[in-house]
Amino acid sequence: MSRSDVLVDADWVEANLDTPGVVLVEVDEDTSAYAKGHIRGAVKIDWKQDLQDPVRRDFVDRQGFESLLSARGIGNDDTVVLYGGNNNWFAAYAYWYFRLYGHDNVKLLDGGRKKWELESRELVTEVPQRPATSYTASEQDLSLRAFRDEVVAAIGKQNLVDVRSPDEFTGKLLAPAHLPQEQAQRAGHVPTARNIPWSKSANDDGTFRADDELKELYGEAGVDFAKDTIAYCRIGERSAHTWFVLHEILGQANVKNYDGSWTEYGSLVGVPVELGEAR
Amino acid sequence: MTTTQGCAAPEQTVALPAGIDLATQAVIQGVVTGAGTAYARLLDQSGEFTGEVVVSDEGVFRFFAAPGLWTVRIIAAGGVTKDVSVEAKLGEVAQLTVSV
């Protein structure tokens, strides 16, 4: 994988709005964003309602993913272009999800909804009607997904990349600063993790920084590119953004996203936790 | 709030959301004037990104920060950015008005 395989810009999207086989998908947590306006032809996937199991804390299963994409009119051969708000956090999370279930022809709109809006490009409210498909998903590719025991086993051995803000990493905050601070789990980070906030990989307009800048960023922060890597954040969507940078843009092998992230790890009994700066 | 709530910002309303105990929060909020679509970004003392919200149709933004010094960066169409320094204190709402 490289940048040109996985990213498209706004001009490319505008030129392909009516191209058969190209499906735009907006992914947000804020369901009102799509309703207020979206790129013409884009269908919506709700990060929580559509991608999470309604009972257990886990993804929708393979069958659920197949049903979702079939209902959205997405076929196995379609080129899926994902975009969304929050600097593409949830679009990157959905991208990772598509790859987990074996849909490799998927791309991100660089800069996502924010750059599109700031450039005053067209947004419409008309919801497209796409005929249903019979989408077939693969079993989850677990080489892309880390679970808690792997994280504990990776302490001091693999690259652990904590992509939360510095105040979340050191334990001053339990959640990003635009959310109320009212969760019960312990604050801090996984020992030996490096704190490389996701935002360092992006420009103010939400686009990804250049490849050489990204390599320098992670290398200088202590990521050993010869080792396997696990990225985590609070719930796994910001770390999906960093997984995208490391695995898809920079082409690093053996990079996993830990979607349990701090809301799971910080609530586990008996695991090591560090406070303060990285040691 | 449940632990599976996403990290996206809640809707930016004029009043504090119901159920928020201000005594436990250090709130930074404000109103942006003169901009159409705009984003408000919170930066810590080192200039690092800490949070970002879409400014509401009424121009409102809000952060739940830790006590201390912060910078709010307004990012608007046309490449316009404006930085405002602010101090957040526990149990208080630091109110800003930003014209761009």
Image (spheres, coloured by chain):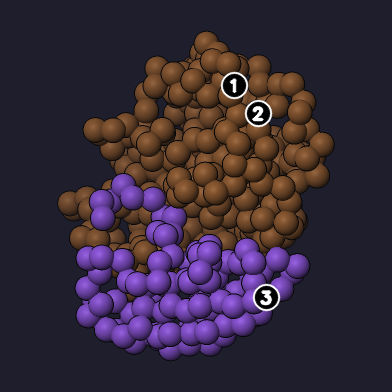
Circle 2 marks a residue in which chain? A
Mark 3 vs mark 2, CA separation in Å: 33 Å
The answer to whether residue A26 shows anywhere in this view is yes
Q: Residues within 10 Å of mark 3 (few under 14, many from 20)?
A: some
Check disc 1 and report the residue beneath it. Answer: A130
Three-letter code, disc 3: Thr
The shade of chain A is brown
Q: Residue at (52%, 84%) from the top-left corner?
A: B97
Query: What mark, if any, has residue A37 been given in the picture?
Result: none
Q: Quadrant location of residue A202?
A: bottom right
Instruction: Report x, y in % for residue A192.
Output: 41, 59
Mark 2 vs mark 1, CA separation in Å: 10 Å
Q: Residues at badges 3 and 2 in contact (C-beta under 8 Å)?
A: no
The shade of chain B is purple
Check disc 3 and report the residue beneath it. Answer: B81
Mark 3 vs mark 1, CA separation in Å: 39 Å
Query: What mark, if any, has residue A23 been given in the picture?
Result: 2
Where is A195 relative to A172, above or below? above
